[in-house]
Image (spheres, rainbow, N blue to C red):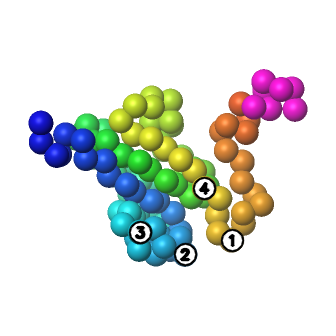
Amino acid sequence: MSDTTHRVRNIFIGSHALTDGFRLIGFETLTDPDEQRLDQLLSELQREKQRALLIIEHSVSQITSKLLEQIRKEGGRIILSEIPSLYDPDNFQSDLDAQLKKLTGG
């Protein structure tokens, strides 16, 4: 087996304020993407069957992207994690929050 078989791309997608920090620790970054740029990256990951850890800023999760929704539901090769905005950390609601509220009746 070659090393490329197990290669995982670490990618941060979000605001300029946070991309600098993630770039410093070795992440690829996509700064302030629109739907087209986001879908282009996600399509590439799927088409090439690449493994990836995507860390996205909460504001990116608000972009209407069918591919982002598909990746959320699939799991597997592409792992998706969401972090709050640097400028609005108190306004962070993840999909997990909504699921927990349904389960607990909250």
Q: Label 4 vs label 2: CA separation?
A: 13 Å
Residue at the image position 50 percent from the left and 36 percent from the top? 72
- The quarter of the image holding the N terminus is top left
Q: Are marks 1 and 3 in contact (CB under 8 Å)?
A: no
Residue 20 numbered tag: none
Q: Amino acid at mark 3?
A: Ile
Residue at the image position 31 percent from the left and 42 percent from the top? 51
Q: Is residue 24 something one can see in this rendering?
A: yes
What predominant SS class does the magenta segment belong to?
Answer: helix
The residue wearing badge 1 is 87
The residue wearing badge 4 is 83
The residue wearing badge 3 is 25
Q: Quick one: which residue is furthest to the right in this view?
A: 106
Mark closest to the chain's N terminus, 2 or 1: 2
Judged from the image, the secondary structure of the residue bearing numbered disc 1 is: loop
Quadrant location of residue 49?
top left
Q: Label 2 vs label 1: CA separation?
A: 9 Å
Q: Amino acid at mark 4?
A: Ile
Mark closest to the chain's N terminus, 1 or 3: 3
Residue at the image position 75 percent from the left and 58 percent from the top? 91
- Which stretch appears magenta? 100-106
Mark closest to the chain's N terminus, 4 or 2: 2
Q: Amino acid at mark 1?
A: Tyr
Task: Judge whether 35 appears above or below 46 on screen.
Answer: below
Residue 17 numbered tag: 2
